Amino acid sequence: MTTSISSNINRRTLLRAGVGAAAAVGAASLGWAQSSLGGARLLVNEAVTADLSISMLAMRYRSWADYISTNMRSKQMLVDPVIDIRRFLQQAQSDDKPVLVFGKSVNQLAKLVRDHGYHPVVKRPDPYKAAFIVPKGSQIREVGQLSGRKVLMPDEFAATSAMAKAELRRLNVRDPYISHTRFQDSVAAQVSVGLAEAGVVNPTIARKWKESGGTVIGETQPVVNWSLLAAPKTSPEAVAKLADSMMAMSTQSGGSGILSEIGVKEWARGERKEYLALLEYTGE
């Protein structure tokens, strides 16, 4: 346990050195807590689609963090990227909570909202839907035919997996043989060589799959997409102000460029009920 804690602190210390010393939030009225590690943190989870190192991910989100700091009149914010979903949840739930959380595992974000007091700020406006894929020439034509079949999914903590299992239950698919591999692109690679009869992937992988001649046999129900959450102690006024600032980004030349860096075209305001509805669907 001591080794793990030391590793986390050392990693964050290196990140802090790379982006400049993070200072305390300047606007105390915002209700933002200061991290015991030296300043406000933006905790980022790229879930099971990231193909970059921790340092490269920190650079990807650096401009966005600076934009947030400027618009919220605070000092520079530390970017703390985490790829492993379990570690991401541990950090979000720890006593040393980040000021902001951005993530792609929306089922886990929904739990932070429901169970840990985090506040939805903004989300991608397009809904998230996972897709069921089969190889070209497969006799499987619809999700309902997956009873007893081998279905490969990404990390069991990922939203893609939680939603796929929910859809299989909804369609009364009986006794599928479900296995997991860590990354989304690994699902497609293994299905393509016959290691599974079907797989479940995110929309980006599904689009590439179709372009290469594969078949998408169905999708899950639409749910809330990538989201930014504010820490439990954030004041309602700060949440509203931050949401307004984020939603204005797409109309600003500098803001739209920053959004492009993180794979978002624009933001929409997040609502608590959407995250509760997601968890009702997945049964988590």
Image (spheres, rainbow, N blue to C red):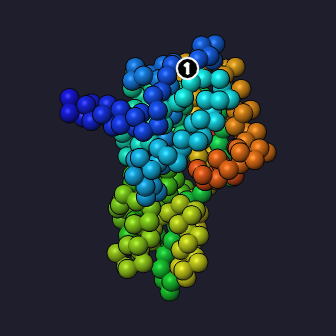
Image coordinates for residue 41, horizontal then vertical, percent: 49, 30
Image coordinates for residue 253, horizontal then vertical, percent: 75, 47
Q: Quadrant of residue 21?
A: top left
| Viewer-proximal residue among 198 and 119 | 119
Q: Residue at x 37, y 41 (%)?
A: 86
Count of residue discs: 1
Image coordinates for residue 183, horizontal then vertical, percent: 40, 59
Task: Name the quarter where the N terminus is drawn.
Answer: top left
- Is residue 113 something that shows in the picture? no
Q: Quadrant of residue 276?
A: top right
Give the residue type that dot 1 points to.
Val
Q: Residue at x 20, y 33 (%)?
A: 3
Q: Residue at x 60, y 57 (%)?
A: 129
Find numbered disc 1 in the image and state the secondary structure of the residue it sits on.
loop
Residue projecting furthest to the bottom? 137
Q: Is residue 148 above or below residue 96?
A: below
Q: Residue at x 40, y 20 (%)?
A: 36
Image coordinates for residue 13, horizontal then vertical, percent: 35, 32
| Viewer-proximal residue among 135 and 176 | 135
| Viewer-proximal residue among 27 and 200 | 27
Q: Quadrant of residue 87?
A: top left
Q: Which residue is mark 1?
A: 25
- Is residue 164 something that shows in the picture? yes
Q: Is residue 112 above or below residue 131?
A: above
Circle 1 crowding by C-alpha within 10 Å: few under 14, some 14–19, many from 20: many
Residue projecting furthest to the right? 251
| Viewer-proximal residue among 160 and 56 | 56
Q: Is residue 100 above or below residue 227?
A: above
